Amino acid sequence: MNKLTEYLYTAARSVHLGVARNTIRKWAALGAIPMHRNPANG
């Protein structure tokens, strides 16, 4: 993905998958799902 508009924020992804936001963060930290941070704001 190259465009910021193609990304989903943690909150949107959690609703999409039906899990808690912390679950998304945990999966990303474990490498189970891809995660990319915006270099402008982290």
Image: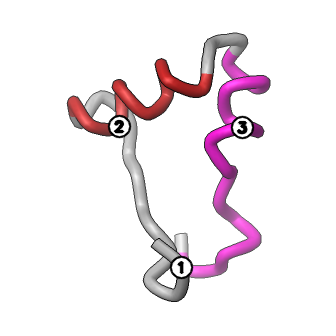
Q: Circle 2 sits on which residue?
A: 28
First of labels 3, 2 by sequence position: 3
Residue 31 lies, in percent from the top left, at 24, 36
Identify the residue at the far bottom of this view.
40
Q: Which residue is mark 3?
A: 11
Q: Is residue 31 above or below residue 6?
A: above
Any magenta on residue 10? yes
Q: Is residue 7 left or right of residue 40?
A: right
Most prominent secondary structure in the magenta stretch?
helix
Q: Which residues are magenta?
A: 2-17
Q: Secondary structure at mark 2?
A: helix
In three-dimensional space, the C-alpha distance between marks 1 and 2, rounded to whole angstroms, equals 18 Å
Q: Secondary structure at mark 3?
A: helix
Determine crowd level at label 3: few under 14, some 14-19, many 20+ residues with C-alpha closer than 10 A: few
Question: Which of the two discs, 3 and 1, labels the residue nearer the N terminus?
Answer: 3
Q: Residue at x 75, y 71 (%)?
A: 5
